[in-house]
């Protein structure tokens, strides 16, 4: 309201014709989230400067109107207005938020033509938009072509690798940044910790932990939570809890991360005790807290505790269960042989069940050999994920376990004529401070011959290993 009052005063005194004043109004409305008013002020301007165009394009980008930012940029070019690297980088950010790959390539070509592709702002925006459009090779080419790389450039490239699940590449880039004496920013640390978590890379996680304290980020709550998560995912739950205990300030995110760590390692009692301590500190649990608690109950098959927490979140904390809470409850009921109750819960959900929920029920049906309910879950999965061969294979295995060989043959026939494909498995292992990754059937590892030789020895020693070579 105060902003509108100021605007009214500006009009009253006839100051709206002043370009600087109008630019400030555009910026004010943008920061208030009222992009329509920003555009109205801009359209009513008699004289527009480069700053005017920059400000109104940025206003649309910041408020999620990517198409509006792109339209304004095109209009600016058509009117022959002078433009700057800030307008170009801003419209590239708009393309990144909307995943506009084709438009991004056009803007890249334009930046080359305008001799702006090597500009730090434009280059960083380009690699960011390519990464978000899953064109990671294009992003890397832009990164390598930049003559000068700021810490923002390095962090954007690392974030791009993480966004595309190329965690090893993110770690490699971090080590390269360290060797080039690049300033280690909060964003760089955030990306590399995400990579360490995904890879369960304990050695690298410890190295980053040391860097965090060396540069004075040890008290940062975000990094503390990330470190707790890294150690938990690496199996070092004691070190995870040590980091948690040493934290002077503990927010809800940190408590949630530690509870989740205990749940992941089937230490349900510790998770529940920590939840009680959290409440004693007068911290209100949120949706994430209850996902971790329900997950802890699922790991130990604690159906009654699970029901208690599921009801508590609704009645005591006024939280509406989302798809993750329902998924945990279906998992809990499935693990404790309450398959019909799990199906009833799915039917009563206030939204459509996801593939993960039906998949959880199908997996429980396999364990407890409920073929009838398995067929119901499988049919739903075939509708939701028609190209996922794993669902067909799982149903076929359920039929086989029940001795229904005609149904096995039928399921495999359906799989053969469909376009469903089973995603290749990938695994990581850390040996002597180095993370190695393997895809099923892949033979590109430099020591693949020795690896297969050792596997053959294991297979020869014990025929029950189930090792199968894929060539």
Image (spheres, helix red, strand yellow):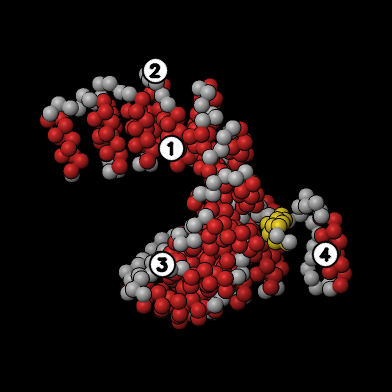
Q: Is residue 392 above or below residue 123?
A: below
Disc 2 is placed on an element classified as loop
Mark number, residue 455:
4
Quarter of the figure with the N terminus:
top left
Closer-to-camera residue (84/263): 84
- Mark 2 or mark 4, which has the lower sequence index? 2
Q: Is residue 111 above or below residue 96?
A: above
Q: Give the image location of residue 198, x and y in percent.
A: 59, 58
Q: Are marks 2 and 3 in contact (CB under 8 Å)?
A: no
- Mark 2 or mark 1, which has the lower sequence index? 2
In this figure, which residue is indicated by the disc labeled 3?
A: 249
- Identify the residue at horizontal 81%, vertical 55% (top origin): 448
Mark number, residue 80:
2
Q: Residues within 10 Å of mark 4 (few under 14, many from 20)?
A: some
Q: Nearer the viewer, mark 3 or mark 4?
A: 3
- Mark 1 or mark 4, which has the lower sequence index? 1
């Amino acid at each position: 309201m105060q902003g509108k009052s100021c605007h009214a005063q500006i009009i009253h005194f006839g100051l709206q014709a002043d370009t600087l004043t109008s630019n400030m109004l555009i910026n004010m409305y943008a920061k208030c989230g009222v992009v329509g008013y920003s555009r109205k002020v801009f359209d009513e301007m008699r004289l527009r400067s480069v700053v005017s165009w920059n400000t109104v394009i940025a206003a649309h980008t910041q408020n999620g109107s990517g198409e509006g930012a792109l339209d304004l940029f095109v209009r600016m070019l058509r009117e022959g207005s002078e433009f700057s690297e800030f307008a170009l980088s801003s419209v590239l950010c708009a393309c990144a938020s909307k995943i506009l790959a084709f438009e991004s390539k056009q803007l890249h070509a334009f930046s080359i033509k305008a001799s702006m592709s090597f500009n730090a702002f434009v280059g960083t925006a380009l690699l960011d938009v390519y990464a978000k459009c899953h064109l990671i090779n294009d992003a890397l080419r832009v990164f390598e072509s930049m003559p000068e790389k700021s810490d923002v450039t390095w962090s954007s490239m690392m974030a791009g690798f993480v966004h595309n699940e190329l965690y090893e590449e993110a770690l490699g880039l971090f080590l390269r940044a360290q060797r080039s004496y690049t300033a280690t920013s909060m964003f760089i640390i955030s990306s590399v910790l995400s990579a360490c978590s995904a890879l369960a890379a304990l050695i690298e996680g410890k190295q980053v932990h040391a860097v965090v304290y060396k540069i004075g980020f040890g008290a940062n709550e975000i990094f503390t939570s990330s470190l707790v998560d890294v150690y938990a995912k690496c199996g070092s739950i004691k070190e995870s809890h040590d980091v948690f205990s040493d934290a002077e300030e503990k927010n809800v995110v940190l408590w949630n991360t530690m509870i989740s760590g205990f749940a992941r390692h089937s230490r349900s009692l510790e998770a529940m005790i920590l939840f009680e301590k959290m409440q004693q500190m007068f911290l209100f649990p949120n949706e994430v807290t209850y996902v971790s608690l329900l997950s802890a109950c699922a790991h130990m098959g604690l159906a009654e505790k699970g029901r208690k927490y599921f009801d508590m979140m609704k009645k005591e904390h006024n939280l509406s269960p989302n798809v993750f809470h329902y998924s945990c409850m279906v998992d809990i009921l499935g693990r404790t042989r309450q398959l019909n109750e799990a199906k009833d819960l799915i039917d009563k959900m206030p939204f459509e069940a996801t593939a993960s929920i039906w998949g959880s029920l199908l997996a429980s049906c396999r364990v407890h050999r409920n073929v009838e309910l398995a067929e119901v879950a499988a049919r739903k999965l075939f509708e939701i994920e028609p190209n996922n061969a794993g669902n067909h294979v799982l149903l076929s295995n359920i039929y086989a376990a029940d001795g229904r060989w005609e149904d096995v043959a039928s399921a495999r026939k359906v799989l053969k004529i469909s376009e469903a494909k089973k995603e290749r498995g990938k695994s990581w292992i850390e040996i002597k401070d180095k993370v190695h990754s393997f895809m099923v059937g892949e033979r590109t590892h430099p020591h693949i011959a020795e690896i297969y030789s050792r596997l053959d020895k294991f297979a020869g020693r014990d025929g029950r290993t189930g090792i199968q070579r894929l060539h």
